[in-house]
Image (cartoon, rainbow, N blue to C red):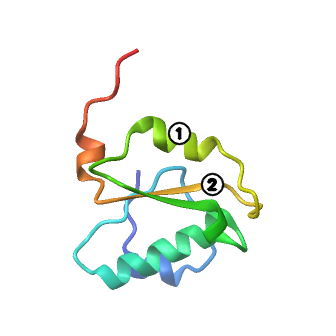
Amino acid sequence: SDSVSAVDFLAAGAKGEVPPVCAVFGDDGFLKRLVLQELKKRIAGDDPEFSATELSGPTAEARDVFDELSTLSLFGGGRRVVIIDEADDFVSRPAPGP
């Protein structure tokens, strides 16, 4: 897993594949918003707002993420995008058992 700075990612434009899981982090809220907009556009296509769902990290559950990713978009034609805001709690929570 390679790290790419926000500036390098934005400068590259629509080049390269977007991995299935991306983490956008850092102190600069403006750059994070720009990167999220570009990710949504590159993953979801022309209408990223119809294919994107935002969840709150402290309350999001893994099943919510998987449900959103497996749901077909009514209007967008691209892949689904799930953004977990404040995801520290989400990624550090133990995985649910079988």
Q: Quadrant of residue 7?
A: bottom left
The residue at the point 47 percent across, 41 percent down is: 64
Is 81 above or below relative to 91? below
Residue that label 1 marks:
66
Taking the image as shown, residue 55 lies to the left or right of residue 57, namely right
Q: Secondary structure at mark 2?
A: loop
**What residue lies at 22% left-to-right and 76% top-to-bottom?**
27
Q: Are marks 1 and 2 in contact (CB under 8 Å)?
A: no
Q: In the rendering, which numbered label is found on residue 80? A: 2
Place residue 38 in its image quadrant: bottom right
**C-alpha span from label 1 to label 2:** 10 Å
Three-letter code for the amino acid on which mark 1 is drawn:
Phe
| Amino acid, disc 2 | Arg
Q: Position of residue 25 (x, y in %)?
A: 30, 66
- Against 48, residue 85 (above or below) is above
Q: In terms of depth relative to the viewer, which is nearer, 63 or 46?
A: 63
Residue neighbourhood size for the residue with mark 2, other residues' Cα within 10 Å, grouped as few (<14), some (14–19), many (≥20): many
Q: Is residue 38 above or below residue 66?
A: below
Q: Which mark is residue 78?
A: none
